[in-house]
Image (spheres, coloured by chain):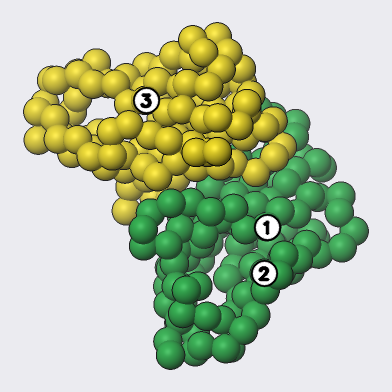
Amino acid sequence: AQKITQTQPGMFVQEKEAVTLDCTYDTSDPSYGLFWYKQPSSGEMIFLIYQGSYDQQNATEGRYSLNFQKARKSANLVISASQLGDSAMYFCAMREDGGSYIPTFGRGTSLIVHP
Amino acid sequence: NAGVTQTPKFRVLKTGQSMTLLCAQDMNHEYMYWYRQDPGMGLRLIHYSVGEGTTAKGEVPDGYNVSRLKKQNFLLGLESAAPSQTSVYFCASSREADYEQYFGPGTRLTVT
């Protein structure tokens, strides 16, 4: 079974609008971390945001925020005020602290921002 | 700081040939990783290292070997390339396991 599920293969959003990219995860470990990475068409992977399982507040980094719903095992990425440069693949990843600590990645969601 | 660099950026191999991909990082990170990325599959971990002189298998290790003789370098070897190994290979490093990963620019490998 997949540990990280990203159900939206592709998403479209109008420039300046907000968009939510879904990520659900599967773990029985009480301690874990969740990451989001961006991969533009140039190919490099860029770290965006991190949420620890014990963090009380949702993580935010500029226009990025993580909507962490622990009971639902979801860690959705919210991008506010979308920009054309946000067009990219977005990957969710999870690290389980009771195992090897090595992150497992989802299959990604493609986001296209329209002008 | 160059961050994480990968050599080469592109390579075409014939079936059965061998090659080594080099990853170097200048951030003094303990952890280093090799991933492959195939369309629709996300990133899959091939091998990783938790420090100089150590290596461990990831999700898809078959057909690959690695070495970490120096802390800053992590080498990925293909002893006998197969068309199924056509992929984009990413190296990454992190300070420790629970920190974010820094990725190299990738190597696009085609095996014919």
- The numbered mark, 2 or 1, whose residue comes first in the sequence reads 1
Q: Is residue B65 depicted above or below A113 in this figure?
A: above
Q: Judge from the rendering whether residue B111 lies leftward or rightward of residue A9; answer left or right.
A: left
Residue A49 disc label: 1
Q: Secondary structure at mark 3?
A: strand
Residue at 56 percent across and 81 percent down: it is A82
In the picture, the quarter occupied by the N terminus of chain B is top right
Question: Does the residue at mark 2 contact the one at mark 1 (Cβ under 8 Å)?
Answer: yes
Read off the residue under disc 2. A64
Residue B22 disc label: 3
Residues flagged by tags 1 and 3 on a common chain? no
In-front residue for pair B11/A24: B11
In-front residue for pair A106/B78: B78
Locate residue B84, reporting x and y percent.
Answer: 22, 35
- Callout 3: chain: B
Type of amino acid under label 2: Tyr
Q: Secondary structure at mark 1?
A: strand
- Callout 2: chain: A
Chain colored yellow:
B
Q: Nearer the viewer, mark 1 or mark 3?
A: 3
Q: Is residue A100 depicted above or below A107 in this figure?
A: above
- Label 1 neighbour load within 10 Å: few <14, some 14-19, many 20+: many
Type of amino acid under label 3: Leu
- Label 3 neighbour load within 10 Å: few <14, some 14-19, many 20+: some
Type of amino acid under label 1: Ile
Q: Is residue A15 depicted above or below B17 in this figure?
A: below
Q: Is residue B104 depicted above or below B82 in this figure?
A: below
Spatial separation of the CA atoms under disc 2 and disc 1: 7 Å
Q: Judge from the rendering whether residue A67 lies leftward or rightward of residue B49; answer left or right.
A: right
Q: Nearer the viewer, mark 2 or mark 3?
A: 3
- Callout 1: chain: A
Spatial separation of the CA atoms under disc 1 and disc 3: 28 Å
